[in-house]
Amino acid sequence: MIENPVEFLQNLFHVAVDTADPSKCLAEYLPTPPKGRVVVIGAGKASAAMAQALEKEWPDVQMEGVVVTRYGYHQPCSRIKIIEAAHPVPDDAGERVAKQILELVKGLGEGDAVIALISGGGSSLLSLPASCLSADEKREINRALLKSGAPIQKMNTVRKHLSSIKGGRLAEAVAPAKLMTYLISDIPGDESSAIASGPTLPDPTTLSQTIEIIDDYKIPISDKVMAYLSDATNETPKGKEAFFERNEVHIIACPICAFNIGW
């Protein structure tokens, strides 16, 4: 018998949080600093802390960047701009920063490097609706998903397919620059493409699965959205595309262990 179960559980919690602290787990995954232009992007509740840890590990690297985190989760950084937005329902700030990030990575070359700092919460914080719906419609769909009881993997399947930046589309925008993604997982099973709806990773989910989830959980959508989801040309990138060839993905902290995945 555990003499003090409350204290025991509190200690477990603090050990888990400490293990996922970016200042303690990011450094071992970082390469030698690139020689060309370095652009840092990111989204998630831990992204500001990740940005702060990166600046600490690379004190002499000339880099620029933008990451978005939840309101109240700001961390001071000198070279990387930290922007706050709403979670779990997106707001206009999340859409503005998504556009800003896409503009920042536009026109990069093969000699440039992009560091993506991604953690849980990034789905709502990095919000750029697909062409078939407005920001208000996207928010209503997100609210319906949150109330539906659907597991996070299924919610993120829908989010990916109704986004212009998630589900691998950000990786497409970064190409042909080198892309290195560092992830902190909050997803059961640690499926990397599900974390923050995988903006920089190939998407194994499909449009047809998205429609099934919407039907199963009775998520209200317009005819315009259904037409978009029924059009195969709107499918997310699957990993065979050339722009994934120079990508690296590292899970630096997760519920069970830290491990590397690469393409």
Image (tube, rainbow, N blue to C red):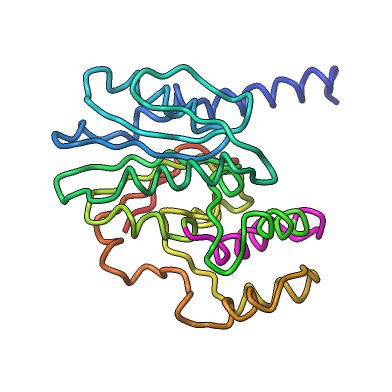
Instruction: Residue 34 in the image: state x and y as whole percent.
Output: 18, 35
Q: Where is the C terminus found, in terms of image quarters?
A: bottom left
Image quadrant assignment for residue 24: top left
Q: Which residue is drawn at 22% across and 18% down?
A: 60
**Would residue 210 appear left or right of 74 to someone viewing this image?**
right
Q: Which residue is drawn at 57% across and 39% down?
A: 93
Q: Which residue is drawn at 64% across and 51% down?
A: 188
Q: Does the magenta stretch include residue 157?
A: yes
Q: How many marks?
A: 0
Magenta stretch, main secondary structure, is: helix
> Against 87, is 3 above or below?
above
Instruction: Residue 117 in the image: state x and y as whole percent.
Output: 43, 38
**Would residue 92 appear left or right of 241 to someone viewing this image?**
right
Q: What stretch is highlighted in magenta?
A: 146-164
**Would residue 120 appear left or right of 155 to someone viewing this image?**
left
> Against 103, is 173 above or below?
below
Instruction: Residue 174 in the image: state x and y as whole percent.
Output: 30, 52
Q: Does the magenta stretch include residue 25?
A: no
Please name whichever residue, 95 or 205, is drawn nearer the observer in this view of the structure: 95
Q: Where is the N terminus found, in terms of image quarters?
A: top right
| Residue 258 visible to the viewer | no
| Residue 211 visible to the viewer | yes
Please name whichever residue, 6 or 231, is drawn nearer the observer in this view of the structure: 231
Image quadrant assignment for residue 36: top left
Instruction: Residue 146 in the image: state x and y as whole percent.
Output: 76, 53
